[in-house]
Amino acid sequence: MEVALAAVAGRWTTLVLRELMHGSASYGELRGRLPEISSKVLAERLQALGERELVARERVAGFPVRTLYRLTPAGEALRPLLVELYRTGVALSSAP
Amino acid sequence: MEVALAAVAGRWTTLVLRELMHGSASYGELRGRLPEISSKVLAERLQALGERELVARERVAGFPVRTLYRLTPAGEALRPLLVELYRTGVALSSAP
DNA sequence: CGGTATCCACGACGATACTG
DNA sequence: CAGTATCGTCGTGGATACCG
């Protein structure tokens, strides 16, 4: 449980993962969809997710240069957990 | 998602909940089963879970006095999430 | 565009000691 | 037994500025 919790813990982590569940996205796209996250924290999250091999990076040449982030198969394995987090969050919010 | 994450976040929280999933337990029993947690942190966790109404307290008169903690229905609603956390943790640990 | 580098503030955790 | 009180440390997140 600690392993899974560590994978999704930290502010913004679940939201970043949620965006990537929709498909690959660039750094700038992620910033656009999560306007409140600072560049530092977004970079930290992407790096942490990269080190755990939950997210992969792909540099796209051209001008301007873009960097696409997408989920790895291990990252996809988190989908049911995120769904359950959402489901449980709704249940807790509506019950009280 | 943030709501559900907040409910289970924090060191020891999932382990405390896991113990209570087995059934009600007293403060001392919890300390016995989680020897590394400090009295302060255990008290904090139980108080936080109590405030969210995920756990209920019951004082049992007699000598010595005992205090039983048990999950509320809202706390029981977390069970599938803990199961999913465990399942995902195993998946992440065995994949790499 | 896609990041790093610094610095600061805050809260969580933990050890220890004490109480009703 | 079941906590509360106090204190120190450290990690995290955020603001700001800067770079290839």
Image (tube, coloured by chain):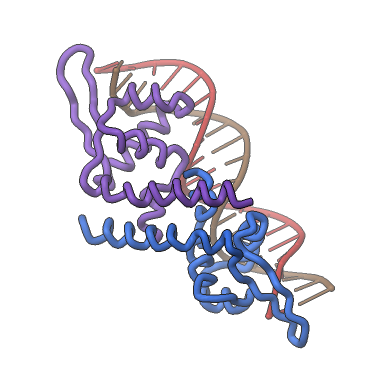
Chain colours: A purple, B blue, C brown, D red
Where is residue A10 shown, x and y percent of the image? 45, 44
Q: Judge left or right: residue B84 versus residue B49.
A: left
Residue B85 versus residue C3 in the image, above or below: below
Q: Judge left or right: residue C10 versus residue B63.
A: left
Q: Residue at x 77, y 82 (%)?
A: B61
Q: Residue at x 32, y 49 (%)?
A: A78
D5 or A16, nearer to the observer: A16
Q: Judge left or right: residue A50 versus residue D10.
A: left
A11 or B20, nearer to the observer: B20
Name the quadrant containing residue B88. Answer: bottom left
Q: Residue at x 27, y 50 (%)?
A: A77
Residue A29 versus residue B29 in the image, above or below: above
Residue B86 versus residue A44 in the image, above or below: below
Residue A27 versus residue A95 in the image, above or below: above
Residue at far top of view? A63
Residue at far bottom of view? B63
B15 or B75, nearer to the observer: B75
Q: Residue at x 50, y 58 (%)?
A: B11
Name the quadrant containing residue A60. Answer: top left
Where is residue B51 shown, x and y percent of the image? 67, 56
Where is residue A13 shown, x and y percent of the image? 40, 40
Name the quadrant containing residue B27. Answer: bottom right
